[in-house]
Image (cartoon, helix red, strand yellow):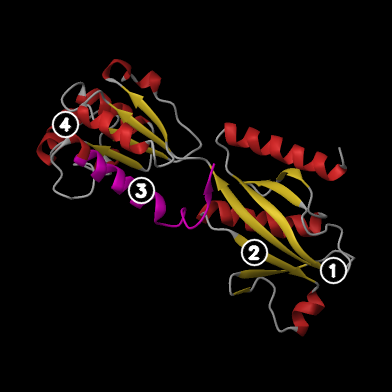
Amino acid sequence: MTPKQLLTADLNNAAETLRASSTAFAIATVVRTLNATSAKPGAKALVLADGSIAEGWIGGGCIRSAVGHAAIEALQDGAPKFVSLRPEDVLQRDGIEIGAEIEGTKFAKNGCPSQGSMDIFVEPVLPQPELVIIGNSPVSHALARLAESFDFNTVIRTESSTDGAKVIKSNARQFIVVASQGKSDAQSLKQALAYGAEYVAFVGSRRKFAALVDNLAGQKCAGSALDDVIAPAGLHIDAVTPDEIALSILAQIVQLRRCGHRQQGGADV
């Protein structure tokens, strides 16, 4: 096995470990170099959310700092970054300020003694989002079936498992749908709120949800958390059947997943 093959194997193993733990990371790849540089095109590194390198090598500390910042930004907004590191005199010659972003390329100073230039592509790899469906109802089963084709890790929790101890939080984005439909609604809603997810939706009418809110008043889950629950769940498409309701809910989740600052191009694990 050549050193290059060994490095590739190490990167793959490290990436699989990060994926298994639903840990977000970025892949930094050197795509072009000019003059003397320590790393050459094809060099790769896995960069964590704090900017540290988990595996691989793309150059010295003067390179890693800029790449670390790019990785942090990429994992925050979900969009890939392209970084061009150049000696300060080259940037000045070309009239480019340090830190400037021009046509999608972020320019940074290469302070390494070699004084070479290097272009690096930084791609975020985000954990596959998790869809948690609470309840054992026609809508819950329809939603689980429909979600199979949309790259979610889907978890179904029936009424028998609606105690708080069953709540499992994840590093991935979590979308919680309460589809208990009259069976342990209050307990199911309390469990849903315990996830602290950005999306919590309740399958039921506004009147029914309002009654639940009144019943839960004064409990720990009352207040702003209940205010953020989407009820009734789903986009308004005049859905009637369980399959139609499930479609409206999944459409709403996909809309949230794909829009906003976190979903502009990042790959899901």
Q: Is residue 233 magenta?
A: no
| Circle 2: residue type | Phe
Q: Give the left or right position of residue 183, taking residue 168 as reference.
A: left
Q: Nearer the viewer, residue 183 or 235?
A: 235
| Circle 3: residue type | Val
Which residue appears at 58% of the width and 74% of the height? 103
In front of the other: label 3 or label 1? 3
**Marks 2,1: beta carbons within 8 A:** no
* Residue 204, horizontal then vertical, whole percent: 16, 36
**Disc 3 designates what residue?**
254
| Vertical placement of residue 112 versus 244, above or below | below
**Disc 4 designates what residue?**
212
Distance between the Cα atoms at labels 2 and 3?
A: 27 Å
Q: Nearer the viewer, residue 205 or 129?
A: 129
Distance between the Cα atoms at labels 2 and 4?
A: 49 Å
In front of the other: label 3 or label 4? 3
Q: Quadrant of residue 139?
A: top left
Q: Where does the magenta region start and end? A: 244-269
Residue count near mark 2 (Cα–Cα under 10 Å), binned few <14, some 14–19, many ≥20: many
* Residue 260, horizontal then vertical, whole percent: 41, 57
**Disc 1 designates what residue?**
116
Residue 82 has which mark?
2
Q: Is residue 249 magenta?
A: yes
* Residue 268, horizontal then vertical, whole percent: 51, 45
Residue count near mark 3 (Cα–Cα under 10 Å), binned few <14, some 14–19, many ≥20: few
| Circle 1: residue type | Gly
